[in-house]
Amino acid sequence: MENKIPYKIYLEESELPKSWYNVRADMKTKPAPLLNPATGKPMTLDELSVVFCKELAKQELDNDTAYIAIPEEILDFYKMYRPAPLVRAYFLEKALGTPAKIYYKFEGNNTSGSHKLNSAIAQAYYAKKQGLKGVTTETGAGQWGTALSMACAYFDLDCKVYMVKVSYEQKPFRREVMRTYGAAVTPSPSDTTKVGREILEKFPGTTGSLGCAISEAVEAAVSHEGYRYVLGSVLSQVLLHQSIIGLETMAACDKYDIKPDVIIGCAGGGSNLGGLISPFMGRKLRGEADYKFIAVEPASCPSLTRGKYAYDFCDTGMVCPLAKMYTLGSGFIPSPNHAGGLRYHGMSSVLSELYDEGLIEARSVEQTSVFEAAQYFARVEGTLPAPESSHAIRAAIDEAIKCKETGEEKTILFGLTGTGYFDMVAYQKFNDGVMNDYIPTDDEIAKSLANLPKL
């Protein structure tokens, strides 16, 4: 092993970022604004504040402030589990026999097992500061719901979580972690909300989706006084909070003169990918450096690679604002694959705009291929990855193999944003050889896209 680069790189406490970075400030073409579905006009601060905490609504609308100071209370909480390590994957490099240097930013060193806590604590803080009773949210695989339940417990807030039904059934232990932290967890779609009952009537027997769960959580928030809705991905405010990942990574890279050529992240709604790449993208947009960015999504829910760039509802029940994004249609219900956190029909408006400009590449991968990479990584690097993060691992291995074939000595960086210890049903199905791949047909996607809102 090379001695000059440690296996794990940690920043000193004094080196930790004190502000979040807003990549929108450096984008020449800003993301299209959220639209009010009733009027077709951009959402105002007052309109957004009915659903979101007011300070978060301000962050959502801010396209110009490059750096936003992180409140001291949040910085103090971050110290529980940050800095997160930047790891040199020496063992993976050796096993692959590649000349590439491989690094990964590991965000699984907290009870939620993922990066989601970075934004959950911020959103809970602003809810508490506003004097609210509690918040509502959705969760797919459960990492976001777990993170939010932890953050709400810290600030003594009520937490209502609508969990995608297939994940509720596949991941009972993650559900119980949420309940341990005081959250009320409901499988979605449910009969506890008007929109849930409508979805169940229209799609009887559905296993749910993040779009369904979002609809229920929003309805629950606006129908209970003293509550607001919070979201774990997609929104610009979430990418802002998650920029702590990329800022730490960039600081560690600069400290050891590491210059990534390729930066890879899994892509569902965009929080993981956006958080990792935003500061690096800022350098690219300012002409200070160049990187190849790769978004990796499941073949069963391919919003970037097969979706349409258009205004669409952020939720299946069509109660949320309209966002311009790469979408499969808000009515698209993905197959019940095991990467629950990536089962969303659309993509962050920020990332969608960057992708549309050709600044990000995208590829889709099938879940059996993803689990092959996950198992290989676990055996050689010793960490059991979440199915979501394993999409990035798949692409990182593929890139490293290309380097072996061409002799190129590239530096590859990817985000390992979650552990897989609550995903053992998925690993069991893979190990038993009964895991299937499902890829939606062109007709299925076209049928869903035909229902995009007419503006």
Image (spheres, rainbow, N blue to C red):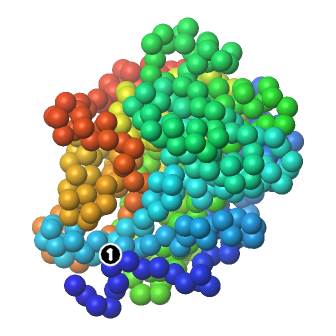
Q: In which image quadrant can residue 67 be found?
A: bottom right
Q: Position of residue 351 (x, y in %)?
A: 53, 52
- Sort mark 1 into few (<14), some (14-19) or many (20+) by Cα contacts within 10 Å: some
Residue 200 showing in the rendered view = yes
Using residue 350 as the reference point, say whether residue 98 is left or right of it.
Answer: left
Residue plotted at (72% across, 26% down): 219
In-front residue for pair 386/291: 386
Q: Residue furthest front?
A: 180
Q: In which image quadrant can residue 398 be found?
A: bottom left
Using residue 330 as the reference point, say whether residue 439 is left or right of it.
Answer: left
Secondary structure beneath label 1: strand
In-front residue for pair 289/228: 228
| Residue topped by disc 1 | 88
Q: Position of residue 248 (x, y in %)?
A: 53, 74
Residue plotted at (17% across, 35% down): 432
Q: Which image quarter holds the C terminus?
A: top right
Q: Which image quarter holds the N terminus?
A: bottom left
Q: Position of residue 315 (x, y in %)?
A: 60, 30
Number of numbered discs present? 1
Residue plotted at (57% across, 15% down): 199
